[in-house]
Image (cartoon, rainbow, N blue to C red):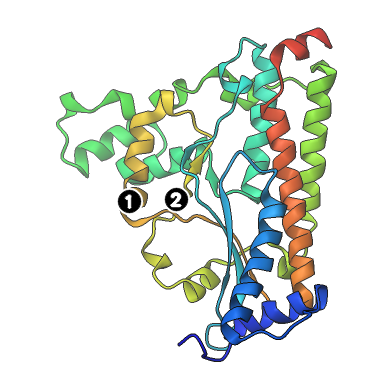
Amino acid sequence: MFDAPLGPHHKLLGRWVASMTPAAKSFTRRQARTHIERVFRNAVLEALEPVTMADLRVVILDAQDERPPAAVVTCESLGQLELGWIETSEAPIPWRAAAYRALESTLGCVLPVFGYQDLFDEMSLYYWEGEATDEAARQCQIEMHGVDPEEVDEDILPSSLNERRPAWMLASNAACSKELPSHLRRALAKLRAAHRAVRRLQPERNAWHFIGQEIYEYMPGAEDCSSLPPLTLVPVEQFAREIDDIARPGMEYGFMDVAGLCPLSEPGLIDSWFASLRVGVDFLIAAQELIQLEPHQLVRVR
């Protein structure tokens, strides 16, 4: 089995490896596999090393039927993303809300993450058959789920969920740019610029792009997973019960943890794929820097 011919994915990576570092010696097939995998793995680890906010992995998937090998980026982290000063500091609410709004509107371009609206929509389907008002949700509980009118749980009605959001989660509380301290303005500008760079990537050469159907074709069994991403920006302290409810299928069958899946039809595309991977890493570094800002520094340079 170790002397079997190299598969399409090893041949693809092997040509890329050979183009970078011509071998000074001949390899057996087994040695070739080990060498190819080591060079690619080291290049990926070097690219992802600066990312600390999530545990990202990359593998090359073998060709499927008429489809070429593909590079897939997955997220091994699970639960709430650490939001640092945005969630726990005494900094002014408008500053924290501005930072949270920026993360909520951009992180999904790279990470498999869900926000409050996703949580609300899942809860609406789970408890209220898609309803979004208290009265309709209450009637659904009574008529569709057979709940006694006197026993409807008021704590899970739409208004109760909305009221539990901390002030820093509300976009309406976010300060405009000119009202923010200079350090925070620069961090937000860097995040938005990095986000635009990710959005400009071509889909066919983008490490952070995927088409749902391709996931199921390349990764048998993925259709049995929950459609929910493994990461969330929703604070568990306020919404532990709701997150547990909607995350239960994911805990049992797995989450949709794919951050990107890129078919690679020729070795020349691998360099482009790495370039796009680094664009996404730059965005994540900008997000990390925003989260790691020190509130006392923001106050001092306001």
Q: Which residue: 66% across, 84% down?
A: 27
Label drawn at residue 265: none
**Residue 169 image offset from top left, x and y in percent:** 57, 25
The kind of secondary structure element at disc 1 is: helix
Q: Is residue 192 left or right of residue 149?
A: right
Q: Is residue 274 left or right of residue 128?
A: right
Judging by the rendered image, the residue that carries numbered circle 1 is 249
Local crowd size for mark 2, using a 10 Å CA cut-off: few (<14), some (14–19), many (≥20): many
Q: Is residue 29 above or below residue 90?
A: below
**Residue 182 image offset from top left, x and y in percent:** 85, 19
Local crowd size for mark 1, using a 10 Å CA cut-off: few (<14), some (14–19), many (≥20): some
The N terminus, quarter of image: bottom left
**Label located before the other in sequence (1 or 2):** 2
Judging by the rendered image, the residue that carries numbered circle 2 is 228
Nearer-the-camera pick, 191 or 158: 191
The C terminus, quarter of image: top right
**Residue 96 image offset from top left, x and y in percent:** 66, 20
The alpha-carbon separation of the residues under discs 1 and 2 comes to 9 Å
**Residue 287 image offset from top left, x and y in percent:** 70, 36
For residue 103, what is the image quadrant? top right
Q: Is residue 89 above or below residue 256?
A: above
State whether residue 267 appears in this view.
no
Check contact, mark 1 vs mark 2: CB within 8 A: yes
Q: Which residue: 69% across, 80% down?
A: 14
Q: Amino acid at mark 1?
A: Pro
Q: Amino acid at mark 2?
A: Leu
